[in-house]
Each structure stands twice: as structure tokens, then as C-alpha cells.
Image: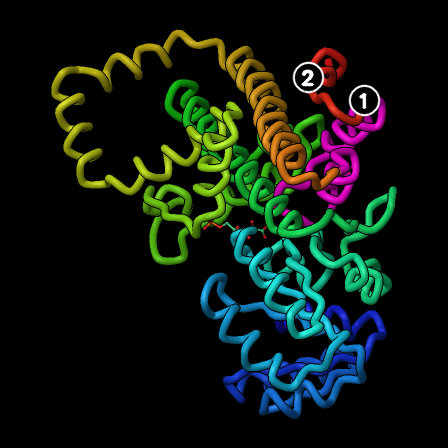
Amino acid sequence: MGQNLALNIADKGFPISVYNRTTSKVDETLDRARREGDLPLTGHHTPRDFVLSIKPPRSVIILVKAGSPVDQTIATLSEHMSPGDCIIDGGNEWYENTERRIHDASQKGLLYLGMGVSGGEEGARFGPSLMPGGSHEAYNNIKDILQKVAAQVEDGPCVTYIGEGGSGNFVKMVHNGIEYGDMQLISEAYDVLKHVGGLSNSELAEIFAEWNRGELESFLIEITADIFKVKDDHGEGELVDKILDKTGMKGTGKWTVQQAAELSVAAPTIAASLDCRYLSGLKEEREKASEILREAGLKDEVQNVGVHIDKKRLIDDVRQALYASKICSYAQGMNLLRSKSDQKGWNLNFGELARIWKGGCIIRAVFLDRIKQAYQRNPIWLVWLLTRIR
Ligand code: 6PG
């Protein structure tokens, strides 16, 4: 992601220096910069050369694993930085770590931003959604760059100054919680259509592609339609049926649910999606349980339901259920953000958050425009939206 973000920045005409402690990665980035149009990018093999290659006041973006690697990187780089320079952490960091680092950086006269970056490697290269929080002065120093580098939608670039402290990381964390919810809802819709409706992979691909032309239009629905069409290169049929139904996670979804509990905010969809990830991990136990249930005749019961099903009606019911659940899930995320904003005095602008999620990020979806509009009409309550969205 770091390499791609650097190439994106250079591609927009901003000269950039890059550094990685693995020398070959620096050389690889230089090679790509040459191949992708002689982009204004220079590579450096030591932290000192890297920092000194930038004209003060410097803005240094770091993209390393969250937690102690960030502290180590800051320690290495800040040795060569001067007061007024800024460090921008683009990882999925716990917001309190960012607040601690803002304080530590200020002791050395350095500015600090914790910036959520969404959209994966592809987004980083061609337009991510960016959620910077922390020093407003630091944001103003790189605002022009961020606005060019971010995904562009009809109502502007997908970046805005989020607020003080760790607000940028917190907003990205909730974005990820919503992402977990979206993925879970799509999985459940798939499960009902496949196991109750008996739809084949090619029918599923068509249904999801059709849904993606309506109110459900979004990145995750779009790629779901594509996934059903991928053939298994090593055997018969489609790859989706060969994927191990077992997942882990990096932590942001868990933090979202922990924060919801902490703030007494109901987030049942996001919590259920986290629970399902844990359950998916119990592969052996689930296989044993399914054997017992099959022996007790449960499989036949489900198959018999399928025989009498009105497929067209089922597909439409699932589509509407998915849309309604998605609205509830986003409302849960937004309510959590409202509660945290009140607690911390961040003064989050919810309409703006919905706007910068319209492009570039994993949860980008057409219906975020309606959420944005609802918040523009009423900046506090999303509940109001639920009566208006129909
Ligand atoms: C993004 C994604 C990305 C990743 C998360 C969640 O916005 O680009 O959210 O950050 O998908 O790290 O990963 P897990 O599902 O493994 O927790």
C-alpha cells in the first residue's frame, strides 16, 4: 500500500521521496515509477538520507503494521526531523495510540496525523478514501496533495479533516466495523439464496449483478457478483465452492464492538458479524455438529423447503432484507461515531463522513449519498433517515 500511495502522489505531480528498510523494495518502487511514466520519485536507503532529502517543513507518511512497528519507525525517523515537521500514520491504528503519539510528537515540536486509508492496494494507487485526524495545521500543509490523491466523486475528493486527536483512526475503525457487517449480510443473503433457493453460481452472479444496478449498488456487491464467475484453475467448477469457510481478522472489527459496548451503543449487526468470524474459526466443531444434525435429518428438512419455494419472491425478499439490514448496520456505525464524538468533543460532521465514503473505500455504496443528504437535513439523528429513505 505504501508503494502504491507513493506512486499515486507522484502521479499527481508531487515530487516524493521513499524509504523502506528492505533496500530491494525501494529499488522496486523506483523501477515502477520509471515504468509508470517517469514519475517524480526518488528512493533512499537510509532513514537519514530519506528525511534530509525532503525540504522542511516535511510531511512524512508511514505505512507499517499498527502497534509497536509504528513506534519504532517514528523513533528512527524523528531523530532526523526538525520542529514543524509532521508524521502521518496511514495504518489501521488504535486511536489511543495515536493520541499518545500526538502528545509525544508535540514534545519534540513535531506535528502528527493519524490517517485512516481505505481501498486496499488498488485504492492506494488510484484513489483511496482518506480519514486524517490530529493536527489541523499538519492537515493544511498537505491538504492539496490529499485532495488530488483521494478518490474523486461528483461532490468532491474523498477526504476531509476529521477532527482532533485519534478521530481519524476511530472513524476508520468504525468504517471497518461497517465493512464486517456488510460482508456478513452479503454472506447470509448468499446462504439463503444458495441453500434455501437452490440457486447456482451463475444465477447468483446474475442476481448480484442485477442488485448492483439498483439501490444496493456498491463495491462489495459488485465484487460478489464477479466472485461467483471465477473458475477453479485446478479442478472442476467455481472457486467459491472450494474456499475454506474459515476466517480471522486484524482487529478493527473487534475494537468497534468493544467500543460500542463501552459506550452503551447497540451495534447488533456488527457484533453478529464478529461472532460469525469467531464461529467460522471453529471449523472442526462445526463439521462434527453438521454430521450430527445430518443424521438427525436436518439437511432433508432444508432441502424440502427449497422444493416448494417461489424463487422470484425469495430473491426479492432477500434483496429487500439485505437493503433494510444494511441501513440498520450503517446507522449502528454512525450512532457509535456520534456517541464517541460527544464523549471526546470531536464535533464529527456525519454528512461529510458519508460523503468521503462514497468513493475509494471498501464500503463505498450509492446509498451513502442518501445518508449524506439525511445528515445535511439533520446533522445529529440518522433515525430520521430511516423514515425518509423508503
Ligand atoms: C480498507 C479495509 C482494510 C482491511 C481491514 C480489515 O478499508 O481498505 O478495511 O483496511 O480490509 O484491515 O481487515 P480484517 O477483515 O482482516 O480485519
**Mark 2: C-beta under 8 Å from nearest atom of ligand 1:** no
Residue 117 drawn in magenta: no
> Residue 275: x percent and y percent?
37, 33
377 is higher (above) or lower (below) than 153: above
Q: Which residues are magenta?
A: 349-377
Three-letter amino acid code of the residue under disc 1: Asn
Q: Hey, which quadrant is residue 210 in on the image?
A: top right
Quarter of the figure with the N terminus: bottom right
Q: Is residue 232 left or right of residue 364?
A: left
The residue shown at (67%, 67%) is 106
Three-letter amino acid code of the residue under disc 2: Val
| Residue labelled with disc 1 | 378
41 is higher (above) or lower (below) than 303: below
Q: CA distance from mark 1 to mark 2?
A: 10 Å
Q: Which mark is residue 383?
A: 2
The residue shown at (41%, 27%) is 191
> Residue 279: x percent and y percent?
30, 35
> Residue 173: x percent and y percent?
56, 45
